[in-house]
Amino acid sequence: MSARHTREEVVNSMPRTGFFGHPRGLITLMLTEFWERFSYYGMKAILVFYLYYSVAKGGFGIEEGFALQIVSIYGALIYMSGIIGGWIADRLLGTRHSITIGAVLIMIGHILLSLPNNFTLMLVALLFIILGTGLLKPNISSTVGELYHKNDSRVDAAFTLFVMSINLGAFLAPLVVGSLQMNIGFHAGFAAAAIGMFFSLIAFVIMSKRSLGLAGLDVPNPITPEERKKTITYLLVIVLVFALYFVYLAWRGQLDLPHFANMITFLGVVLPVIYFTLMIISPKTSSVEKSRVTAYIPLFLAAVVFWMIQEQGSTVLANFSDKKTQLDLNVLTNGAIDFRIPAAWFQSLNPLFIVTLAPLFSILWTKLGKRNPSTVVKFAIALILAGLSFMIMIMPLQSGVQLINPLWLVLSFLLVTLAELCLSPTGLSTTTKLAPEAFTAQMMSIWFLSNTMAQGLNAQLVNVYTSVSPVRYFGIFGGIAIGLGIILFFVSPFIKKLMHGIH
């Protein structure tokens, strides 16, 4: 087994000429991530419509509640797969080979979606995308970090540019794919996503050889022969347990989507509990670190509630934009504009607002200085804003109109994006600060599991949305988020005390 290269060797292996003062490898990773996100968000923008639109309109004609549930399960599995993808890169393949294989799997999935197919083949396509995203998404972000020395002042700027490429892809994709879906058909939209993933793969394979040097080629913690045997045993046990569970469901006549959704929800809740328990009871965690982990738990739960609302932008609000929103500008403008807004276009609002507002938030936090709200208060503000994004949807619904003005949806997406800018960057930063020394990587996995838990719970909530009035649904869950935000605000002094100096 060859020795790992040092950070110095990796950085020095890359071309000296760069991209606006950054290593040339950054533009390679940005282009790869841009097209991957274009592919992902483009497909996701029309997936729920594909499931519940009638066969005559090019869909599968599935009951709307089931369609929303499938998209929520898909989202939960996407984030779960990242844990596996990170492990494979760390122990078996390294990040660069993991990214390449992930890109190929995603492209295959989108190609399968772009072909006329049956429901089973569609599920197989989603499985390819889930596995591919798990290999690509966490590892391409890790590779960005490998381009720089640990104390390089350019790292924050590099990740800012990287995140901009993510949001640019996420912004453009629904506009392109949504237009193709409405004017030509679903398979044309999925084909655009497949082409985007093809460009992502080509950009990475061709450009990485010249620009990334040794970055991503090492396996950080290669698995030993002894560990390999133990790992295979664990994997076989896990596979056997799941196989027996599915056999049991089949025997009971319960091998169906609701029971599968229950399993995903269960895993989404149990995995974070296991992670937290292992860290708190570990002898490697000091008493101060245990206190900080305890302080992190209410922040994690707040993040779960936030993501439950935010992720419903591609399920509940997507359905709302399609069914209960006036999309015909001819009606809204009294005949001045003859155009129908594709329902998928609303999925571009969140990345658009992030790109335009993130710099303003960065300036705001800096200008506030000592008056900058604490981490806990920012989380409380995020929950209140997220709750308001649901509550404001009640106002047009109570007016009695059959189709609401689309500007209400724009306002809802704006409020939840403001909440995201309070919570997401702060959450990432706080996760690294509160992490025990021995569990730095695992703590970051827990942060991403907050989204997994949220979407696992959403797989149950979408059934509520289709069984109660929209006014009641938005009112109940918006009110819960606001109430929890207020509670978090009042208990913030106790949580800050548990943080032991981390602000």
Image: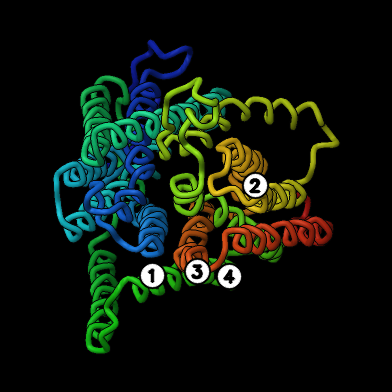
Q: Residues within 10 Å of mark 3 (few under 14, many from 20)?
A: few
Q: Position of residue 379 (x, y in %)?
A: 70, 50
Residue designated by label 4: 283
What residue sits 26% from the left and 79% below the top?
Answer: 246
Is 371 left, or right, of 201 in this rendering? right
Per the model, the C-alpha gap separating discs 1 and 2 is 32 Å
Is residue 420 at all visible to an observer of this figure?
Answer: no
Q: Secondary structure at mark 1?
A: helix
- CA gap, disc 2 to disc 3? 20 Å
Q: Which mark is residue 421?
A: none
Amino acid at the residue labelled 1: Ala
Closer to the eye: label 3 or 4: 3
* Observer-nearest of 330 and 319: 330
Mark toward the start of the polypeptide (1 vs 3): 1
The local crowd at label 4, few if under 14, some if 14 to 19, many if 20 or more residues have their Cα within 10 Å, is: few
- In the image shown, does 17 or 29 lie closer to the viewer? 29
Q: Which residue is mark 3?
A: 467
Front in this rendered view, residue 207 or 41: 41
Residue at 60 percent across and 69 percent down: it is 280
Query: What residue sits right under mark 1 in the picture?
Result: 261
Answer above or below: position of 474 versus 231.
above
- Of the residues shown, which amino acid type is indicated by label 3? Ser
Are the residues at dot 2 and dot 4 in contact (C-beta closer than 8 Å)? no
Separation of residues labelled 3 and 4 (CA atoms)? 48 Å
Q: Earlier in the sequence, mark 2 or mark 4?
A: 4
Mark nearer the N terminus (4 vs 1)? 1
Q: Quadrant of residue 249?
A: bottom left
- Mark drawn on residue 396: 2
Residue at 63% in and 63% down: 472
Q: Nearer the viewer, mark 1 or mark 3?
A: 3
